[in-house]
Image (cartoon, rainbow, N blue to C red):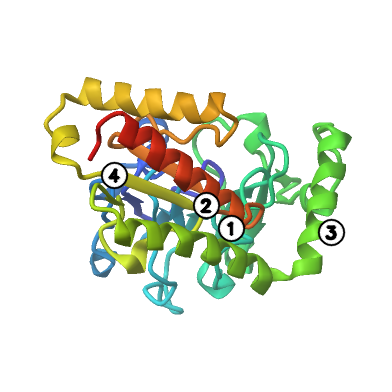
Amino acid sequence: MWALLGPKPVTVLAWESFGKGWATDVEKQLKLRPTILESDYGKIPDLKEIDWSDDVIFVANGTTSGVRIPDWKWIPDDREGLTLCDATSAVFAMDIDWSKVDVLTYSWQKCLGGEAAHGILVLSPRAVERLESYDPPWPMPKIFRLKKGGKINSGIFRGDTINTPSMLCVEDYLDALAWAGEIGLPGLIKKSMANLKVVEKWVARTDWVDFLAESKEIRSSTSVCLKITDRKFQSMSREDQSGLIRDVAGSLSKEGIAHDTGSYKDAPPGFRIWCGPTVDVSDVKTVIDGLESACLHRLIT
């Protein structure tokens, strides 16, 4: 965003924490006065409202809301602006139509379970053209500088160790890629969808829980977010709801069943189950059994 935005108006789609974070960066840091199409957790903005003469920023999958984009058809091939996509928890678990994306980022640690704090940047020829023909007016932090001598710094994409990352982390990710290569992309997607199906069957037979995503077409298959619909829970204060969720998540962690199952801090109180391709169906079933037992024990019936 720091290197590419500025020549065109900007539209940001924001329906969960990270999308809202990108909107804040564009509005408060770059001061570009973007159009922000925002919706509540569990929903998605009206994609028909997008002006495609703008540069458009969006997340492919809302890790904190369990909401993903329905498909890639809403992005026109003849768009004037660039599309900038945060696909952190989508790559290697969901289909990506690369012809629709000009800038895509994802991090190692999500769908393949690599080390955190590392990311991958993918640029289209249109994005490279913008990068080489445009110099932003604001000061550029060194880590964001992608040009050298007026041209894209190809060393960044060749694998040069420009900032000396941990080689142990690189080796770990190469090992993860080798494992993924044995399964293949269709196999990785299939694993994630099988995990989601386990949760879907449980939700269908359980009267006190539901998906945070309001419709199946935007339901994430990796960061599966759940809300508690029980009337007793709904009558609690937000503070008491959050406290109960922390209590349940803490008990699951202490018992070695699952870690970090509480909803994201900015999201409505509920649960979040990671269903990416590094997780097996048997693991998801164990989490659900533990979650159901812990919740019922606390009188959510």
Q: Earlier in the sequence, mark 3 or mark 1?
A: 3
165 relative position to 16: left or right: right
Relative to 193, say whether 290 is above or below. above
Closer to the eye: label 1 or 4: 1
Q: Look at the image and tell me in which quarter the C terminus lies.
A: top left
Residue occupied by mark 4: 227
Vertical side of 22 occupied by 219: above or below: below
Report the front residue among 100 and 15: 15
From the top left corner, tell me how far across and down residue 236 is, in percent: 15, 27
Secondary element at image label 3: helix
Give the label, 3 or 1, closer to the camera. 1
Q: Are marks 2 and 1 in contact (CB under 8 Å)?
A: yes
Q: For label 2, count other residues whose C-alpha is less than 10 Å away and answer few (under 14), some (14-19) or many (20+).
A: some
* Residue 150 left/right relative to 176: left
Give the distance between the C-alpha atoms of the residues marked 3 and 1, in whole angstroms: 21 Å
Q: Which of the marked residues, 4 or 3, is nearer the chain's N terminus?
A: 3
User: Closer to the camera, 288 or 48?
Assistant: 288
Q: Nearer the viewer, residue 95 or 299?
A: 299
| Element assignment for label 4 | strand
Q: Amino acid at mark 2?
A: Lys
Q: Which residue is mark 2?
A: 285
Tell me the number on the disc at residue 261: none
Q: Residue flagged by tag 3: what amino acid is it?
A: Ala
Residue located beneath label 1 in the image: 281
Q: Amino acid at mark 1?
A: Val
Kindly report the distance in space between the C-alpha atoms of the residues bearing marks 1 and 4: 21 Å
Mark 3 touches mark 1? (CB < 8 Å): no
The mark closer to the camera, 3 or 2, is: 2
Q: Is disc 4 in contact with disc 2, using a CB cutoff of under 8 Å?
A: no
- How crowded pointer 4 is (Cα within 10 Å; few <14, some 14-19, many 20+) is rated as some
**Which residue is disc 3 drawn over?**
178
